[in-house]
Amino acid sequence: MTNRWVGVTVDCVDVERVAEFWSALLDRPQDRSRPGWVYLGHAGDPQPRLVFQPVTEPNHGKVRLHLDVAVDDIAEGVAQVLALGGRSTGERHDYVEGVVVVMADPEQHGFCLVEYF
């Protein structure tokens, strides 16, 4: 049996808003989905598909799984996230290999922007 990773599902109160944020940030178009859900990408994509699933309760506390998004320039990446309606958490880590800045999408799902040197 062969197992492979095909996607990540994100619980959202406002599915359209959060999906639009990630679609713009990752330059991934929306694909057909179930009513009320939004998919970025499709099952055969070389990259895992992002699935935005409707839920009734907002995000509470830190989620222990997050996405890392590689950027060419950390300052430009942060500016893009802010312009799309995300926010900076103020957390930054400078390493020999690069810089990591912790950000959040419009519903406070945390993720990292990473600039590798």
Image: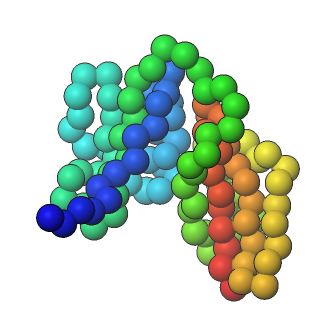
Task: Please report the residue visible at 62 percent of the width from the left and 40 percent of the height from the top.
Answer: 63
Instruction: Residue 99 in the image: state x and y as whole percent.
Output: 75, 72
Q: How is the image coloured?
A: rainbow
Would you say 42 lies left or right of 91 here? left
On screen, residue 68 above or below 54: below
Give the quarter of the image for residue 67.
bottom right
Task: Please report the residue visible at 67 percent of the width from the left and 73 percent of the height from the top.
Answer: 115
Instruction: Residue 53 in the image: state x and y as whole percent.
Output: 38, 29
Task: Please report the residue visible at 70 percent of the width from the left and 31 percent of the height from the top.
Answer: 61
Give the quarter of the image for residue 35.
top left
Would you say 17 lies left or right of 8 here? right
On screen, residue 110 above or below 92: above
**In front of the other: 64 or 14:** 64
Give the quarter of the image for residue 106.
top right
Residue lying farthest left?
A: 1
Instruction: Residue 64 in the image: state x and y as whole percent.
Output: 61, 45
Residue 109 in view, yes or no: yes
**In front of the other: 14 or 8:** 8
Q: Quadrant of the N terminus?
A: bottom left
Q: Quadrant of the C terminus?
A: bottom right
On screen, residue 104 above or below 73: above
